[in-house]
Amino acid sequence: MAKRDHFQRIQRLRYHHQTYRNPYFQKKRQLPWNFILFFSCGLLLILFFLWIFLCSSLFKITSVQFEGIEYLSQDELTESVWNYLHKRHFLLFTNENRFVFDDETLLNHLESYYSFEYLNIILEKNHVLTLSLKEKTSGLLWNSQEKTYVVDLQGLVIREISREESEWLLSEIHEDDSLEQKKFLFMPRFRDLNDIDVTIGENILTSDEINAIFLFQKYLNSQFIPFIETQIDRLSGKWMGILAKDGYLILFDAYGDIDTQAKHLASILSQPSINPTDLEYIDVRFGDHVYYK
């Protein structure tokens, strides 16, 4: 009996200490509501602050201003800047936000349309984006694929002409035109006969070629030979010609002796039997051998 009592005492102790459980009467676990509530509040707080920093107007660029513009169209330049600023990321926030805005990306964006001497981009504390720039010196107009570009004296493509400048090209020069319009219309015009695609920032001519062409044009002006444009055919070698207003083409070699070629041109045009309006071309590229038709 003592052994049985000892066994019963041990079982009662196990029961009171709950060292085993009935599998049919397991206590259901409760969800950790405190943790879920804390986690949800934290997540909402993080999303709220992200919205404040990335989407609210507190950190948004509200205006754009420029310093140093001379000939560029400020309206078109402003439009190009805002096109970058309005670009969305993940359909939620835009480059207008000062934490998302990147000046290097904007610089690359603008340099795909314009070539500057320099461009400094400053994001002011008062939500103003300031662009301080210096334009490259315009030297000539280059036409290719029915588009016209401004090129500097080193042969580098600066930009495509603006919509307003395109309208200027269709008009004659008048006394009441603005100084800016007159300077633009007086720039020498070049035409690419091959219609090769043009990229902003690339060199389409060398400075030596430009200097030689301008020297030849200077001679034409001194001899009162009006001309319309310079035509260039790269695929035919060193093929350059100046289209005179009388309708004939003057072919010359920009790498040859410009003075000698100019003298040969003068000798042809000075002949009494030569009527410029009847000419198709004069070719002075081959030394003392001058050809005309």
Image (tube, rainbow, N blue to C red):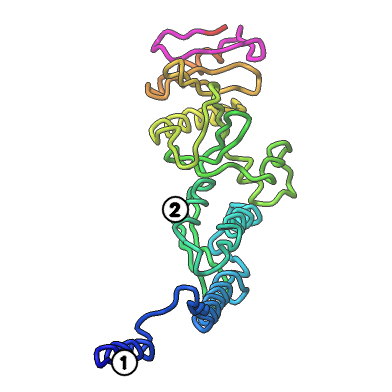
- Nearer-N-terminus badge (2/1): 1
Question: Quick check: 287 left or right of 60?
Answer: left
Taking depth in this image into account, of 34 and 231 the one nearest to the observer is: 34
In this orientation, does residue 137 appear?
no
Q: What is the three-letter code of the residue carrying label 2?
A: Glu
Residue 276 highlighted magenta (yes or no):
yes
Disc 2 secondary structure class: strand
Q: Is residue 173 above or below residue 75?
A: above
Residue drawn at point x = 49 percent, y = 7 percent: 291
Q: Is residue 91 above or below residue 1?
A: above
Q: Provide residue 171's location: percent of width, then percent of height.
A: 73, 38
Residue that badge 1 annotates: 9
Residue placed farthest to the left in the image?
3
Residue drawn at point x = 57 percent, y = 29 percent: 144
Q: Is residue 58 above or below residue 129?
A: below
Residue that badge 2 annotates: 117
Q: Provide residue 35's location: percent of width, then percent of height.
A: 49, 81
Residue placed farthest to the front in the image?
1
Disc 1 secondary structure class: helix
Quadrant that contains the C terminus: top right
Asked which quadrant contains residue 88, the reply is bottom right
Residue drawn at point x = 59 percent, y = 66 percent: 65
Taking depth in this image into account, of 208 and 60 the one nearest to the observer is: 60
Q: Provide residue 97's location: percent of width, then percent of height.
A: 55, 68
Quadrant that contains the N terminus: bottom left
Q: Which residues are magenta?
A: 271-291
Residue drawn at point x = 54 percent, y = 73 percent: 50
Q: What is the three-letter code of the residue carrying label 1?
A: Arg
